[in-house]
Every structure is written in C-alpha cells, then in structure tokens.
Amino acid sequence: MIARLRPMRLADLDAVLGLEEQLFAPDTWTRAMYRDELARTDTRHYLVAEDGDRVVGYAGLIAYDDEAHVATIGVAADRQGEGIGAALLDALLAEADRRSPVVLLEVRADNPVAQGLYRRRGFTEIGRRPRYYQPSGTDAVVMKRERL
C-alpha cells in the first residue's frame, strides 16, 4: 500500500463524494451528511487515504463511551485489493479501542469481500436489517467486535 492515512478535511469532500458515487450509488451519503459528521469532532473520527494528491479511500468512525460504529469505508475501485481498506479499518479500530469496548457496523449483504475483511478483524454477524440501504433496498448484515 502506497497510500498515506490522514484526517479527513472539508476540502476532501469533492473527492470523497466522487468515490461515494462510484462505489455506493444510489445509496450515497450527501455533502451535508459529511459536513455534519466532520463538525462533530468529539465523537467522530474520519480519515482519508491519499496517494500523492489523489484521495483513494476514506473511512469514518462514530465513537461513544459504551460503543463505537464504523460509519463508512470506501476504496477507489482501481485501488481495491491493495490493503487500503484494511489499513483504514485498522486505524478506525485502534481509535475505537481507545474509546469503547464494542464496535458495531452494517455492511451490504451483497458485499462478501467487505464481510470477509470484517471477519478477519474479529467481527461476527449478529443480525440483519432488511432493506437498510436506501433507495436501493439492499439488506445490511449487522456485525459486532468486542475489544481484544
């Protein structure tokens, strides 16, 4: 992996939203959602992976004292399989472990690659959320990891 991780900034939103569209349409987050997340510095931890001046991935964590949530992870399609997603997840989990004993996430039921990554990091499936992702109506797999 050549990409470098750093905190996400408002200036990254054009690149992040481009990746959102590439990866998750039609179920994308909006600019307003990201602006709101970045403003909540007490409970949020957002990162980007950049290679040179290109944002090639991003991730976000919502963390409270009792539990944390992996809010999002995305890696440019042409950079998947290089370990960028794993590096972003590992950085989120390190932050989560400092803040809370449990990490939860939802992952698309039709994304076995991401589910495998989460399982390799100690997550187990604890449930399903039918039609969770909107507007596509794709189901979510709910996964949980307790601090190691």
Image (spheres, grey):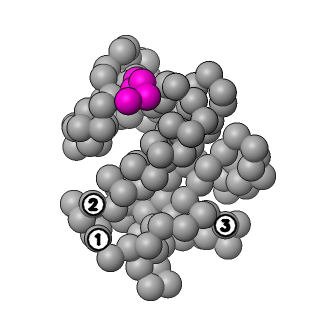
Query: Left or right: 50 with respect to 17?
Result: left
Q: Tell me the tag on residue 9.
A: 3
In the rendered image, the vertical position of residue 65 relative to residue 126, given as above or below: below
15 and 144: which one is in front? 144
User: Pointers 3 and 1 in contact (CB under 8 A)?
Assistant: no
Q: Position of residue 109 (x, y in %)?
A: 30, 29
Residue extending farthest top: 127
Identify residue for label 2: 83
In the rendered image, the vertical position of residue 59 relative to residue 79, given as above or below: above
| Magenta region includes residue 9 | no
Q: Position of residue 75 (x, y in %)?
A: 37, 60
Identify residue for label 1: 1
Query: Left or right: 23 with respect to 53?
Result: left
Residue at left offset 61%, top offset 50% = 45
On the question of residue 53 being in view, the answer is: yes
In the rendered image, the vertical position of residue 31 relative to residue 126, given as above or below: below
Density class for disc 2 (Cα within 10 Å; few <14, some 14-19, many ≥20) is some
Q: Within the image, what quadrant is residue 81 found in?
A: bottom left
Gap between marks 3 and 1 measured at Cα: 22 Å
Mark 2 or mark 1, earlier in chain: 1
Mark 3 or mark 2, earlier in chain: 3
On the question of residue 77 being in view, the answer is: no
- Circle 1 SS class: loop
Give the residues in magenta. 144-148
